[in-house]
Amino acid sequence: MPSIGQFLALFEAVSRRDWEAIRKIGNAVAEEERKKKHFTAAHRILEAVEVSTSQSGFDLVGNIASADAALNSQPPDLLHYESLDGIQDPILNPQLRKHLAEFLSEWRSEKRLGEIGLKPRQTVLLHGPPGCGKSYLARYISRALEMRLFTVRFDSLISSFLGETGSNIRKVFEFASLNRCVLFIDEIDAIAKLRDDRNELGELKRVVISLLQNLDLTKTRSLLIAATNHPHMLDPALWRRFQIVWELSPPSAGARKQLFERYLKEPLADELANVLLKCTEDLSGADIETISLAALRKRLLSDNVELAETLLLAALEHLRRLAGNENLVEQQSEKLMQLALELTRISHQV
């Protein structure tokens, strides 16, 4: 528990309304309790600090959350700081774009919500196939709210030592409690699988319990975003911990056209767009990026070659690679043939 000196320092900080000093003293006391393995006491102290300082309003979005503000504690090696440079508005379907705008509005109105005893929703689960923008959306939300983004490093989080993974999870959530940020857990199914999965060892099942307990105990003003490509593998108890669940799907034809033009930095001619959009149906945003950047490289390294030709060639090569990896040659044959014919036609016109 606090020493006499810490009690006196705490009272002085309260008298002068020095919220940052209150946080530092409370965090120091919680750390001492944690070292003594008094984990429940440490959590209760952190919660009390959060409640008292949250009334101060000193860490509203855009202040303590900004990139140049000092952290209250150093991030553990379990976390990776993500740069948000170059993040643009995501291309989303109208319904998801509306939900995102409402969510961002909640956080930007945090002070007003607090005046009536409410707070923004703080847990978001993103699910959908690979390459559909889950990680990108997490980065965009962080940038839009001017909050640091820390991604959990599973290579450090998952330990071979019995019980240490649960301790690592606790360290991650303690950091999020002490520092206003966005905590991103990608591929959360790696540590939150169904507990009735007979193929999993008892240790991993204990990890799921540890994750659920930390989600319940943590009362923070940070934001937790998790993502998975395999929502069916998640423990049902985890779903209930997330206030928001958004599904991201492969981009529509209109969205694919916007993505092509964003990466290429120029509009697509209608005839070329029609061929590309028909042949890239069901591809992800990541696939569109790969094709576009490959086309730009080919154009730069080739003399007197039009963008249309390099773009069709890049799409043809990408679809061939996908078909070979997934044994979908027969299913992709029509698309491949159409791209090849269009590429031949354009080449003869040059």
Image (cartoon, rainbow, N blue to C red):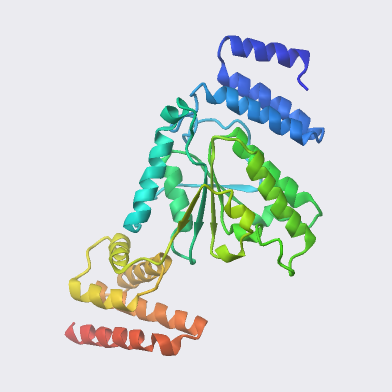
Which is more toward the observer, 265 or 15?
15
- Relative vertical location of residue 144 with respect to residue 49 in this rendering, above or below: below
The spot of residue 53 in percent (x, y) is: 56, 23
The spot of residue 30 in percent (x, y) is: 72, 29
- Relative vertical location of residue 226 with respect to residue 339 in this rendering, above or below: above
- Relative vertical location of residue 221 with respect to residue 250 in this rendering, above or below: above
The spot of residue 72 in percent (x, y) is: 60, 30
- Can residue 44 be seen here? The reply is yes
Determine the residue positioned at 35% across, 77% down.
315
Determine the residue positioned at 70% across, 30% down.
44
**Quadrant of the rendering where the N terminus is positioned:** top right
- Can residue 305 be seen here? The reply is no
Determine the residue positioned at 48% across, 63% down.
128
Using the rendered view, name the quadrant where residue 6 is placed: top right
Determine the residue positioned at 69% across, 27% down.
45
Which is more toward the observer, 137 or 40?
40
Residue 202 is left or right of residue 262, and the answer is right
Which is more toward the observer, 9 or 264?
9
**Quadrant of the rendering where the C terminus is positioned:** bottom left
